[in-house]
Amino acid sequence: MDIAHARFLFPGVRDRVFLDAACVSLLPLPAEEALARLSEDLLRCPARDASAHHIALDRTADDARREVARLIGAAPEQIALVESTTQGLQIVAAAVPLTAGDNIVVAGTEFLGLAVPWVPRRQHQGFDIRVVDCADGRVTVERFARVVDGRTRLILLSSVQWTSGYRVDLAGFRELADRHGACLVVDAIQQLGAIGLDVTKTPIDFLVCGGHKWLNAPVGRGFLYVHPRQLECCPTPTWGYLNIVEPAEGWANYFATPSLPAVRDYQFTSSARRFEIGGTANYPGNVVLASAVGLINTLGIASIEAHIRRLTDQLLADLPAAGARVVSCPEPECRSGIVTFTLGGGPARDRACLDFLLARRILISQRYTQGVGGLRVSVHFFNTEDDLRQLVAAVAEFQRR
C-alpha cells in the first residue's frame, strides 16, 4: 500500500479539509474493522468458556505492544500500554523518586499536561521545578544547559512543541542529561506517526505517547516506553494482579485451584508491563491502537515523513503570499507535521479567520502557550496538495474581505 491509497482508508477526509491531527485525528477503516471484530467477540463469546474468552481479551495487548515497539525501534517487553499521555506521565512521576534539593527542568512553552503530574508533588517532596524561558518557541539544549545541574533528576520535554511544531534536538538533550546524570522524559504525542523516532539511536529513559493524535487511534489508548536501565532500577509504580508473573499452569487453572491464597508474596514481571494498571484493560483501545499503528508501519514512517515534508514545504512557501506570517521555524531539522501561522492583529483576528475556515469545512486549530502560537495546521499522511491549496486560498480570501 502506498500513501495515495491510504487516503481512501479515512472517510473523515471525504467531505472536508481535515488538517487537525494534532488535536484529535481520524480513525482509519482497518481500525474500525478491528473494533467491529472485537465487538462481535464481546457479543458472542466465541471461546470455549468465559475464562478462555477473558484470556483472549487480555492478549489483545500483545499486538499493540509489538506494533508500537516496531514503530520506535524498541522491544515489546519495553512497552507498557496506558490510557493516555497523562497517565504515562503520572506513572513516571510515581516511579522516579524525588527528594528535597532535587530539581526537574521543563520549558515554559510546554503543554501544561507535561508538568502537572509533578506540580502537586513538589509541595510535599521538596524538589524544585525549574522553568526554561523559550518565549520565541525554540526549545534548545543551550537554554536548558543554563539551568540543569548535578541535582537535576528529570528533564521533561515534548519532542515536538504543540503550539509551534518546533522539533527539538533529542540527541543533544540526551547528551545533556547524561552529563548530569538526569533522566530524559519525552512526550512524543506530536511526533510519533508523522516523524520517525528510533530509541536505539536516541536513547530515552521514558517516552510517552497517546494514540489519539498522529497515531490515528482516538479511543483512549497510548503507550509508555521504558528504557532497560529504568526497568532495572525503578520500583514498580503500580500493583495489580496482571503485573505479576503469569502462573505456569495458566490463569484458568490457577483460578480453579482450591488452595489459592489472596495474601502472599508475589513475583512481579520484569518487563514494562509492570508499569501498566495491572487489571482489566482497555480492550477496544488495544485493537484500535494495534491496527492504526500497524497501518503506519505498513506504509513506513520514512515514506510518511517524506510525504509530510513535501506538503509542509508547499505550505511554508504559499502562506506568505496569502498574507500570513509563519510562526513555525523553517529550518529542516526543527520541522514537524505542524505549521503555525498568524495574520497579525492578535488572537481575535486569528480567531475570526479560524471561524471563516471552519464555516468552509477546513479544520485547523488555534493554540497558544507563553505567547507562542497562532493558527495551527497539522499535515498528516492522509492529506494532499489540494487540501493545502484550499486552505491557502481560503486564508487569502479572508484577507481580502
Image: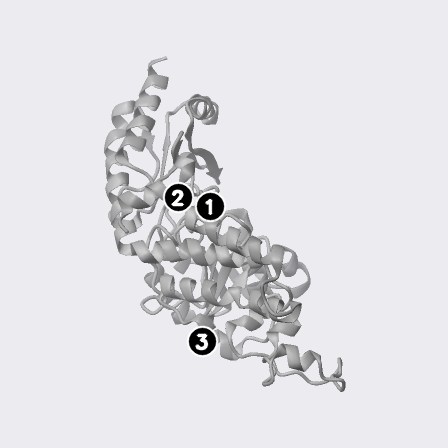
The scheme the figure's colours follow is one colour
Say which amino acid is labelled 2.
Gly
Q: Which residue is mark 1?
A: 109
- Horizontal and vertical percent position of residue 267: 62, 83
Reading the chain from its start, which is encountered first: label 3 or label 1? 1
Q: Which residue is mark 2?
A: 137
Task: Please tell me how crowded label 2 is: few (under 14), some (14-19), or many (20+) other residues with Cα within 10 Å.
Answer: many
Image height of 211 relative to 235, above or below: above
Circles 1 and 2: CB atoms closer than 8 Å:
yes
Task: Please tell me how crowded label 1 is: few (under 14), some (14-19), or many (20+) other residues with Cα within 10 Å.
Answer: many
Task: Please tell me how crowded label 3 is: few (under 14), some (14-19), or many (20+) other residues with Cα within 10 Å.
Answer: some
Q: Which residue is mark 3?
A: 228
- Horizontal and vertical percent position of residue 188: 43, 55
**Mark 2 → mark 3, Cα distance in angstroms:** 32 Å
Say which amino acid is labelled 3.
Pro
**Mark 1 → mark 2, Cα distance in angstroms:** 7 Å
- Horizontal and vertical percent position of residue 119: 61, 55
Identify which residue, 68 or 253, lies in the foreground: 253
Q: Say which residue appears at 61% left-offset and 58% top-offset.
A: 44
